[in-house]
Image: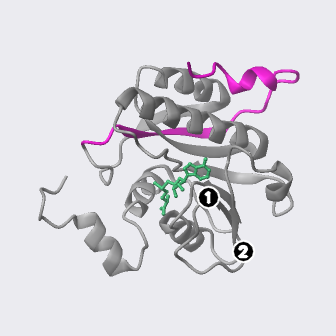
Amino acid sequence: MPRPGQPDIYRTRARAEGYVARAVYKLKEVDEKYHLFQPGQRVLDLGCSPGSWLQYIVSRTGPKGLVVGVDVNPLAIPVAPPLYFVPGEVTSLDLEIITAISPVFDVVVSDLAPKTTGMRQVDQQRSLELAFLAWDWARKLLREGGHFLVKVFEGPDTPTLTAVLKAGFNLCRHVKPAGSRPASREIYLLGLKKRSAPSGARASQSGPRPR
Ligand SMILES: C[S@@+](CC[C@H](N)C(=O)[O-])C[C@H]1O[C@@H](n2cnc3c(N)ncnc32)[C@H](O)[C@@H]1O
């Protein structure tokens, strides 16, 4: 974490490399280690504004890929196929708006973050609710064998989400990328290779709800 007055190396680097946010380096680090993205893939990015993850994902999936971003806030990058932007609240967005663009995705990522209040428990709870919402979307839209990356502010209820991902994926990892500010409570949960849903188990797959 840079001291006041000191430059943030990730911010400086993002500016120099043409990314609209320093957040890109967190995703890049996870991708370099776990190989999330391949050319031609369909990717859904929840909480995508201002758009640095989208910039990176489009560069990895290429012209034959398809990338859909969702956010309440506008993007700071141009939008043209293979990139699509759906403005709106993830809490109330119609699934059909997304499935009209692509009925299924190879990777779902979520950098959704609540407006922080400074009250740690409240912020953790809101972040966990957003992470579970992202999982609900991934549960419905991610193909079998697909990957899911989700941000959450770590707290006493994080294991409820971990348990759900462990049940839903062949491999589950907690990741704290170097680009994530050390003082921040954020971590990323990664589910690799989504398992097929056992028949009749759809409702229980969303797992325990945060308190
Ligand atoms: C950390 S920023 C994402 C940064 C992005 N990954 C990037 O690289 O540019 C988190 C985003 O989550 C969005 N967000 C938070 N709650 C949301 C909600 N309920 N519905 C849609 N977007 C939401 C915010 O508007 C914000 O743009």
Q: CA distance from mark 2 to mark 1?
A: 27 Å
Q: Is residue 102 left or right of residue 206?
A: right
- Horizontal and vertical percent for residue 78? 59, 81
**Residue 101 located within the stretch drawn in magenta:** no
The structure residue drawn at horizontal position 79% and vertical position 29%, both measured from the top left corner, is 197
Q: Residues within 10 Å of mark 2 (few under 14, many from 20)?
A: few
Q: Residue at 58% x, 26% y: name it.
A: 166
Magenta stretch: give its range: 183-211
* Secondary structure of the residue carrying numbered label 2: loop
Could you tell whether 69 is left or right of 142 in the image?
A: left
Can residue 66 be seen in the rendering of this structure?
Answer: no
- Closer to the camera in the image, 197 or 208: 208
Q: Is mark 1 within 8 Å of ligand 1?
A: yes
Name the residue carrying label 2: 64
Say whether mark 2 is within 8 Å of ligand 1: no
Q: Quadrant of residue 28?
A: bottom left
Instruction: Judge whether 41 appears above or below 119 on screen.
Output: below
Residue 92 vertical placement versus 206 (above, below): below
Q: Which residue is mark 1?
A: 72
Inspect this view and state whether residue 121 appears: yes
| 16 horizontally vs 161: left or right | left
Q: Please tell me whether mark 2 or mark 1 is closer to you in this view.
A: 1
Q: Where is residue 160 drawn, in percent x and y?
A: 54, 21
Could you tell me how many numbered marks the image carries?
2
Identified at 78% across, 41% down, the residue is 140
Q: Position of residue 129 (x, y in %)?
A: 58, 33
